[in-house]
Amino acid sequence: MGLEQKLGDFGFVTTKLQDMVNWGRTRAMWPLGFGLACCAIEMMATQAPNYDLSRFGMELLRASPRQADLLLVSGRLSRKMAPVLRKLYDQMPDPKWVLAMGDCASCGGVFNNYAIVQGIDEIVPVDVYVAGCPPRPEALIHGIMTLHEKVKTEVFKDYA
Amino acid sequence: MTEVLEEKTTKLVNLTIDNLEITAPEGTLIVDAAKLAGIDIPVFCYHPKMEPVGMCRMCLVDVGMPMRDRDTGETIMEKGKPKIQFGRELQTGCTVSVSEGMVVVGYTEKVKKGRQDILEFLLSSHPLDCPICDKGGECPLQNLTIGYGSGESRFDLEEKQHLAKHVPLGDLIWLDRERCIQCARCTRFQDEIVDQPVIGFQNRGRKLQIVTFSEPGFDSYWSGNTSDICPVGALTTADFRFGARPWEMQASASVCNQCSVNCNITFNTRREAKSGGDLVIKRAMPRQNEEVNEVWLCDKGRFAYTSVKKDDRLTQPLIREGETLVETTWEKALDLVAEKAKEAGKEMVSLVGGRLSNEDYFNINQLTAHLGGKSLLNSEMAGGDLVSQVGLGTGSNIADMGQGDAILIVASDLEEEAPLFWLRVKQAAERGAEVIIANARETRADRFAKYKIRIAFGQETAVILSMAGAKEGIAVEFLADDAKVKAAAKVFSEANNAVIYYGSDGLGLSGSEELSKACAFLLSETKHTGRPNNGLVAVWNKANLQGAWDMGFRPSETLAADLKNAKFAYVVGNDPASKDILEKSLKDTDFVVVQDVRLSETAEIADVVLPAQVYTEREGTYTSAERRVQRFYPAVPAPEMTKPDYKITAKIAKRLDLSLEKIAASLVFLDLAEKVADYAELDYVRLAEVTEQWPIIGRDDLFYGGTSYQNTQGLGKQISPAIETETIKYEAFVPSVLSKKDEFLAVPVTTLYDRGSTMLSSEVLQPRIADPYVILNTADAEKLGVEAGVQISVKLNGKTANVTAKLDDSLAKGIVLVPRSMGIPISDPGSITIKAK
Amino acid sequence: MANFERFNPIPILKGLYTTFHSTFFEPVVTVQYPEEKRPVSKRFRGRHHLRRYDNGLEKCIGCALCAAACPADAIFVEASENNDDVRFSPGERYASTYEINMMRCIFCGYCEDACPTQAIELGDQYELSFTERVQAIYTRDMLLDTVDELEKATPRKVEPGAFDRSIPMMENPD
């Protein structure tokens, strides 16, 4: 916008650095698959050829926090598991995002009892909640797209 | 359980119900006997509190009797057992009483078929709109259809009756004519239990319908109970209409604080979108306590539970800055209060109302005593000290009174002042107790009274003394003849048990004090003290005035002067400024602290306002007029910044180097029990004890007793009067002569539906609340040229007000009844000027 | 290279052939989701809808049986009174507040089964992701079907007595 309109088409675009960084981040958001229950099956299906998360630059869905940008929590988080989740989250380098996949991760779902954390946002900050029990792979991808939209609105000021 | 019935009849019979051999007192109905044994016989029209009618035929059972030889009269034996002969037809279990050797069978195909057919008939015109019915979920018809119905109907659905579904039966009760199954529980309740047959049946057969005869419709203080006992959703209450489904609500036990009976109630609460997602009270239901309210509740208790309108609620401590009150922090407010209290020292006065809990009274009294101030009660009735001496003996239960007992009601319109007392006395009268009424005007209690002594206002004390035989000094002529008084006195003194209910009908503080003394004297003269079902009951007009007296608060004749001379007034839970004279003297008080739940008139002139909690938001205990101490529990969460009264007082006390309990009401009560002798043996655990009650109500089988709640949270404990240590002597009697300078004498009376803050905050009761009115004698009114219902101008205590005139020809000439809390402040009888407009 | 004699290229070539074949000759299985959507099955249970009668009146009568049936406690219903001047649904009662927390909902369809008027139906929308918890609360207005004609909108004034029954009349069994 702006410059290229005035100068004519020289084969380049101008953009804000901020937008470019955000664009870059959305294009290679490596997930950490934190599969906890039935939702994990759908999460794996999302990674498999039928839905193929690689299309979004999410090549490796693995249990390694050091290279991950996105924490996919899928399934019910028990109180015993909660410290583990927090530890993995802390081990992830910034910038990092969290997606709560399914009802149980989002708010405890049907498991309204003392053993289950009533929403993982008690433990880690959640960027996107995906509803469904479990959500279809499409729904998870929709959640990731929602996250992308959110990431695109981030500003430098908040990067810190 | 059985013991409850066994006490009344001694003879027991053996019978078999559904192969279970049981023993039941003779005369028990089969349904009740089965209930005692834990066997359910389904009923619709039968209610354990009412006479059986056998209208619905749901309780069909097969009844067999041992066969007897016609010649010898001996039981015919077969295989070592009596031979049983069953009747040809099924019988209704609610109309047949048990007898020796009876065999009742409720599980055979014949019985099942009978019940199925009855249900099929009942449902032949029932709309089956359970999803939208307020009763759905706690409906006997629903439950019994599931349990005993056939599952399908042979009737033509086209022929279902289509009737009006939205009929207002008065302002409080809605009638759905389609749902009615014609069991007559409601009409029988109005007729038998409360003697107010304002609803009844019209037409016959399938056309039969419930209509109201009164104007305004369903004009009764008891209408809400009919919806409890209605076995279908035909009668529903206006406040709960479509409010919530029964299974969605939480139940929390409480005690009604509208009058001094302290009925046990259960509040049903639920989150409400209209209130911004807050937990709110959806309805109040009676909670069974056979010694207090049985399973009933008056309409005021049922519908006036709002306590405070949301907009009026105090939620933040306020402090005066110049002309206005500004919000402040607790710390600042309490520091200032403590500082001023310290300065005032002995010249402080604490003035409390009648709706605080015992714990609050105790802490406030401790604080006041610490400073050396005066503990005053804002009340126009006296005698609490005497009630604590000659009150009802422990173990009293008016339901035990009957033949050979006497109940004296003096200066009280019992139904207006304490509806449940009226109901209980009425039932005692029906059991044969002699009811004596000494009143200056007609009341609804006259109907069942055997001795009606009509006196003039001001003669209450005289008539009681005359009954006690103290002849000297009584130079008052009664309207009633002397013989009647003598006869009544004889009955009273010869009664096995005798109770006096004294109220404040037409009495001010001094008159009430005299009357209470006279009543105590009469009881001690006739030796009706210190035993169960004997003693004095003060019909207070506020819930916990007895508790306030027990904790050491006293009303003052010179309240205005006391407030005027005080340097520091600590006004808790009452609104003295609503009375002109007190407002003037409060303005002269150096420093006024108001601790209340709403911004009252007094709060508006206060220096510091402290937000307290409503009784539905906290724990505590009340002491009823019968001196029963009962616990109430929190039902809804309190606003964040508010605190219960005892806690606020304790926080002030801490700043004045007095350590008072503030953590929990139960701990305050422990302190209280230590210091107040009468309460010595009580604690919260004992108050929460329950015993089995009869009838068995409010469990899974709502068909038997209606939707009243089972009491699992405590029946309370009656504390014993201190009669053993003290004797009552009545000193010289000075007949208080009511001066009548002008033409008319205004006397204060109590009315149930007044314009008090609790009534005005109830939405559904609004149409039932009258405009300010006075009642005139018809002849007087004619002379003045006043017609019923017109506006007149009255001048009382120097204040003029415009009120509606009501006429009553039974009233004595020259008397004007001025209801309390009705917009015209009145504390004592006095002269009144009336001008027609 | 001691193992050279044992080297057998056949399995490797076999494997490479599989790769080659599936890359060039087999159809692509990947669903290009955001652009291309696979149709859901007939019995799929997605986000709820509150249906209307043909005349535009709401089917929901606020009986809260759906809330009672809900195993996840996701539904909150509050009813109010209905009359001919301000009519939302037939009969005396309508749902003045109807909220479903999609985050709690497990899409089991019990609400559908419990509904006496078939007002609530689970649709086929599954794209339910939220960045805030509060977005997951679907209110009555979001759930209700839209009307195509203005005169069918609720609340509206109707002729007295025409809609006095909440639940459609039962028919005699054959």
Image (tube, coloured by chain):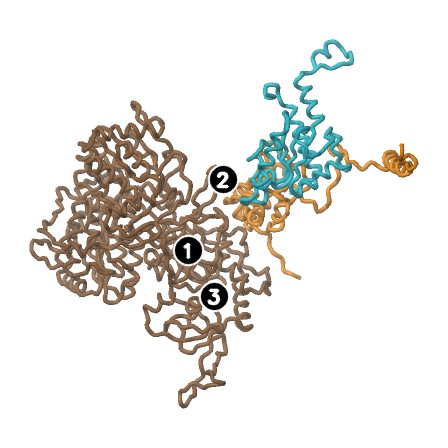
In this rendering, position of residue A21 left or right of residue B70: right
Rendered view: B353 above or below B202: above
Crowding at dot 2, Cα within 10 Å, few <14 / some 14-19 / many 20+, comes out as: some
Chain A, hue in figure: cyan
Q: Residue furthest front?
A: C2
Chain in orange on the image: C
Residue B327 x %, y %: 36, 27
Question: SS for tag 2?
Answer: loop
Q: Which residue lies furthest to the top in this view?
A: A7
User: Is the C-beta separation of discs 3 and 2 under 8 Å?
Assistant: no
Q: What residue type is labelled 2?
A: Ala
Q: Which residue lies furthest to the left in this view?
A: B472
Residue C2 x %, y %: 89, 34
For the question of whether residue B601 can be seen, the reply is: no
Q: Residue B273 carries which label?
A: 2
* Residue at mark 3: B40
Chain in brown on the image: B
Residue in the picture at 31% in, 40% down:
B661
Question: If the image is split into quadrants, where does the N terminus of chain B sit?
Answer: bottom left
Q: In which quarter of the image is residue B562?
A: top left
Residue in the picture at 10% in, 53% down:
B476
* Residue at mark 1: B708
Q: Which residue lies furthest to the bottom in this view?
A: B71
